[in-house]
Amino acid sequence: MDDLLLRRVRTGLGGELADVRCTGGRITAITEPGSDAFAARIVDGHGGTLLPGLVDAHVHVVQWATFRRRINLDAARSATEAIELLLAHLLARPAATEELVVGVGFRDGLWPDKPHKDLLQRALPGRAVALFSADLHTLWLSPAALRLIGREHPTGLLLEKDCMSATAQLPSAAVEEQDHWVAEAVATAAARGVTKIVDYEYADTVTDWTRRLAAGPPSARIACVIARFLLDQAIERGHRTGDVVADSGGLLTIGPFKLFVDGALNTRTAYCHEPYPDGDSLGLLELPPEELVPLMRRASSHGLVPAVHAIGDRANTIALDAFAELGCVGRIEHAQLLSPEDVPRFAELGIVAAVQPAHQPDDRDVADRHWYGRTSRAFPYRSLLESGATLEIGSDAPVAPLDPWDGIASAVARTDDDRPPWHPEQAIPLPDALAAASGGRRGIAVGDLADLMITAADPSSLSPSDLRALPVTATILGGHPTHVKES
């Protein structure tokens, strides 16, 4: 029988102790605790708090699963230090013989020196080395790595489209091994309360997840985002955003259609109204309106909701103008810097602001430098919320870890270390942050989908640092446990 009883849980923030029954994938009863009722499966919540399951609204799943196994360069404060970290890792693993040495997570927006292929050649003569920036918009290659993919480049520092096309050419693990890594990564996310992931991998996500499903159900629901190069194929297949993928048992759905208007802050390619301080560049416009609007029109007319990447304020203006012209629903991914007059347009146009609060503590220093004088309207979550906009929280993993608690805490605290909050006026209340990280769900009620989590403590009683480390006692997907912490 498809029947689950959650004993001794507190229903929602500040909730009363109760027993909660789930049947057929839904919550079917909330009763006084301590009843003698039978169920096919019983999970003891030990007085923990029952909340809606978390939704990571923006993940690059294969990249996240892969990057978890790469050399972490996040701590590097210069190109020289990045190479020192790389060498230290390799010296600790002298038997490593990989064809390609891969490092991830560097942030060069504040570095005093510049990445260059010659630095990698001097440190590792003849070795193929590929280093990815934290924002995934920059790829730093050694001469041997450039030869490996048949390219020439004066500096070895590839940005935006060059970065992404070169990434696709680099050697990668076998599909079977990648699928194993993905399954592990999703299970790890489930252990943090995640019940749904929106997969923005630049690939045929529908085909990839259908293959993975045949090997075993994932530990979370997956929304399969449609990449730009697959638009015609998606239309031919009859895919529409929100549709359940056939024979997936409701675990796979069709996600939105992804487009890029600009680049990213760290690479100084986010497209802005005002130039960056080191020159006269406004950033990079990936899709001008005359190309953006027809693509959005074609997608939306076939039931595919546009999800438009826009980070700089000018890119967000262009994206909002396109939605206004077309009158269609959609999403803006990131919305990191907004002009004041654009903030209310999200609610007016019904556009979701899909944001990544964990990026704000990571980017505060580079924003202070490259968006000097404009940071009061950077990562403007309170302003968006008060204007009536819908916020959805994602991680953009591997840019940040696939752990919504990090984003929730960052949205509430506007810091992730011992520094004072950065623009605390843009912090949002915990209940709103939780809702934004739970697909808009608030509280627990009979009839709700049984995608749930039990936290060891009530989140409303915790500090931001404790929120980030909050243990999850159990995660429930459609009434079935995907994670139960051993007592």
Image: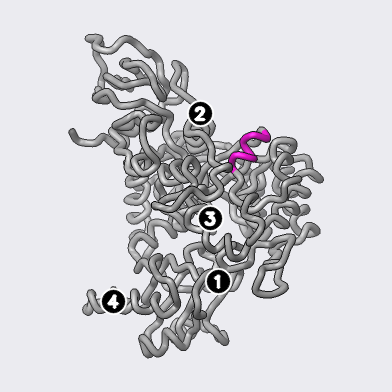
Q: Left of 301 or right of it: where is 238?
A: left
Asked whether 170 or 53 is in front, the reply is 53
Q: Amino acid at mark 1?
A: Cys
Q: Earlier in the sequence, mark 2 or mark 3?
A: 3
Q: Specify start and end residues of the magenta stretch as a single range.
A: 381-387
Where is residue 96 drawn, in percent x and y?
26, 76
Q: Of discs 3 and 4, which sits in the foreground?
A: 4
Which residue matches tag 1? 163
Q: CA distance from mark 1 to mark 3?
A: 19 Å
Which residue matches tag 2? 441
Which residue matches tag 3? 204
Q: Of discs 2 and 4, which sits in the foreground?
A: 4
What secondary structure is found at the residue carrying circle 4?
Answer: helix
User: Residue at 68% of width from left, 67% of height from top?
Assistant: 284
Q: Decide whether residue 386 is among the magenta residues.
A: yes
Label 4 neighbourhood size at 10 Å, few (<14), some (14-19), many (20+)? few
Q: CA distance from mark 3 to mark 4?
A: 37 Å
Which residue matches tag 4? 88
Q: Amino acid at mark 3?
A: Asp
Q: Of discs 1 and 3, which sits in the foreground?
A: 1
In this rendering, does residue 117 appear at all?
yes
Q: How is the image coloured?
A: one colour
Where is residue 331 drawn, in percent x and y?
64, 44
